[in-house]
Amino acid sequence: MLGATDRHFRYFARLLTKRTVLYTELVNIRAITEGKYTSFANFDELGSPVALQLAGCEPELFAEAAALGEGWGFDEINVNLGCPSPRGVDGGFGARLMLEPELMARCVRAMCGRVSCPVTVKCRLGVGSDYPLSRFVDFVGQLHEAGCSVFIIHARGGNIEWMNTKQNRSLLELRYDDVYRVKELFPNLEIIINGNIATMEQCQEHLRRVDGVMLGRVAYHNPFVLADVDRVLYGDADFQAPSRRQFLEAILPYIAGEMEKGVFLSHFTRHLLGVYHGCRRSRAWKQFLTEKTADKHASLDTLRQAIELAERE
């Protein structure tokens, strides 16, 4: 989800669900500690609850970045140990660090010593060819002893030797039962499951065995799946999600304000391509936005035209 769940997408998503924990895009700890990533300093409370997702491998820098994140208002600091991309492997972060549990335990311990908000870990069921479930259980145990009580587990292993990110999602076996087994072994930990979960029915099924569900690409490519979360999963009968037109009209003032600061329309519309997913005019909506908003001079009227096209009877 690198480059996907930025502050614009989180603003849009929060209009569809008030209860869901949203995660930032993956941010390297050095970008924060060296002052290269400053947009979080203007953290908008509209987005809460939001977790700051960090990548790195140095305990001291992790602690410093976590403290800055908590100071900016984030509700959770998340350590990403699940990204299998070559960029992550080459950069010394992500899934490859599951091979160094002692180091990551030091990182977690350092963060827990600096912040009062939860420090959580997102990981896979292992990485490489020699990573049985017993080894993963030891990994969870070490990080739990260091202070982590919440694990978001992608129900696959990871291959960082020759598979790219897409292949890691599509070619490796889903192992939901192994995640359930981890919950049985650690009943006092909060175990959240991730991996090819796309519907509220699937979420409800998993919630019979674990504590939470993470939706990844489905929530980005079909954001209106989030419109059912508060009612179905949180039992909030009073929450009324907007229609697609209401949602789009509600975000127009936000987009207008950001465009006045010099942000191009395409920075927003790339997050909106899936708004009409499954609807009759979905293809026309995507094509119009893709073709018409690529021009840096595109105005907000372009988005209004797209809305009328998609809503046409």
Image: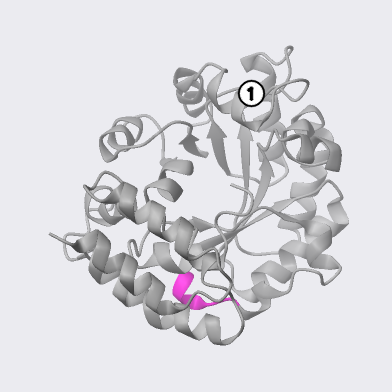
| Image quarter in which the C terminus is found | bottom left
Question: Residue 129: x percent and y percent?
Answer: 72, 12
The magenta segment: 43-48
The front one of 175 and 261 is: 261
Observer able to see residue 48? no
The front one of 227 and 69 is: 227
The front one of 40 and 2 is: 2
Please give the name of the residue rendered at 39% of the width and 58% of the height, measured from the top-left corner: 288
Compared to residue 33, the image places residue 127 above or below, namely: above
Is disc 1 surrounded by few (<14), some (14 to 19) or many (20+) residues within 10 Å?
Answer: some
Q: Quadrant of residue 289?
A: bottom left
Question: Residue 296: x percent and y percent?
Answer: 58, 72
Side of 80 relative to 218 (left or right): right
Compared to residue 251, the image places residue 236 above or below, namely: above
Q: Quadrant of residue 273?
A: bottom left
Side of 259 relative to 137 (left or right): left
- Which residue matches tag 1? 137
Secondary structure category for the residue under label 1 = helix
Please give the name of the residue rendered at 32% of the width and 76% of the height, measured from the top-left corner: 250
Please give the name of the residue rendered at 77% of the width and 40% of the height, measured from the top-left corner: 88
Task: Judge whether residue 45 is colored magenta.
Answer: yes
Compared to residue 82, the image places residue 29 above or below, namely: below
Question: Residue 39: x percent and y percent?
Answer: 67, 74
Q: Residue farthest to the left?
A: 313
Observer able to see residue 42? yes
In the image, what residue type sits under mark 1? Answer: Val
Side of 188 relative to 20 (left or right): right
